[in-house]
Image: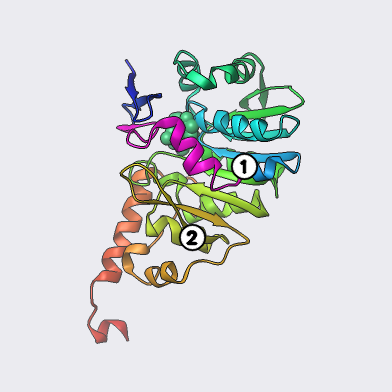
Amino acid sequence: MIKEVRTEDGSLTLFSERFREPYHSVTAGAFTEAVEKFCKPCRIRERARTGKVNLLDVCFGLGYNTVAFINEALSENPKARLKIVSFEFDISVIEKSLKLDWREFNRWKWVLREALKNRRCERNTLVLSTEDPQVQLKIYITEGREFLKKFSCRYENFADAVFHDPFSPKVNPELWTYEFFKGTRGMTKETGILATYSTSTAVRRALHMAGFGVKEGVALGRKSKSTVASPSFKTEEKLLRKFKLPSSVPFRDPALSDPPGLISSRREGCINLLSRSLPLEVLY
Ligand SMILES: C[S@@+](CC[C@H](N)C(=O)[O-])C[C@H]1O[C@@H](n2cnc3c(N)ncnc32)[C@H](O)[C@@H]1O
């Protein structure tokens, strides 16, 4: 049985037995996190005023980030047109989400209900979508790297905002690699902004290597600051200095297909090698 967890702001989330982590920050609050750590750093309200906003929602999960995005954008500009592209390998979590009380966001449940009803198959992949002219949502039910390989070419230069929200790099490293961010960069506009809750130097370095400028984001709850990145930002000097440390070695997944355990141990191996001071005769 999947466990419900009440978070700091009173909103409910679920606990994943497989990843041994909750789907949202319990200390920040699930819906508060969606607004403060994802919508605000990506300036969703400001972009909604232009009339159109495109979101790449990395890991659909319970759909809270997408729902907060719709709510923020349409509260700011009720005429805005929104496109959301997302992926998720566990369709059952979307179904479970609809059984929870979303409180003030209940009015957006129709979006997920319609997507769950409207199913089709594209390139051997199940796709859920809404046909609403104002809120166009597409969720690819597949593994994230498969989504990149099969479908990212459809979304080159697509995203004004990227909400990067897998489980932590420790348990979900395949979605935090240099190669994954490189694929994400291709889907992001020059002015697009990526927001993530992670503050890991390895993650920040991978983003930097993939073509994003990287900055520290806001702090929320008891956790430290988050991360914002954009092709149009310049990476902060203090972060560039940290990228020289062995512990900043990024996760790598050259063919976007390695098992998570291998991705983690490859990184640990590199850090060990770099941390060991090798005798000069070995170096030359
Ligand atoms: C932290 S939750 C995302 C929460 C979500 N953003 C929300 O607002 O509700 C991470 C999600 O990523 C999915 N996931 C983890 N690894 C994945 C992978 N390799 N490919 C596709 N989905 C993955 C999990 O099933 C889970 O639903």
- Residue at 52% in and 27% down: 63
Residue labelled with disc 1: 44
Type of amino acid under label 2: Lys
Secondary element at tag 1: helix
What is the quadrant of the N terminus in the image? top left
Q: Within the image, what quadrant is residue 22 found in?
A: top left
Q: Which residue is mark 2?
A: 215
Q: Which residues are magenta?
A: 19-44
Q: Residue 131 at what x, y percent from top left?
A: 73, 22
Q: Nearer the viewer, residue 180 or 13?
A: 13
Q: Is residue 30 in the magenta section?
A: yes
Residue 159 on image: x %, y %: 66, 45
Q: Residue at x 65, y 29 (%)?
A: 138
Q: Position of residue 247 (x, y in %)?
A: 32, 63
- Distance from disc 1 to disc 2, alpha carbons, whole Å, reads 18 Å
- Any atom of ligand 1 within 8 Å of the CB at mark 1? no
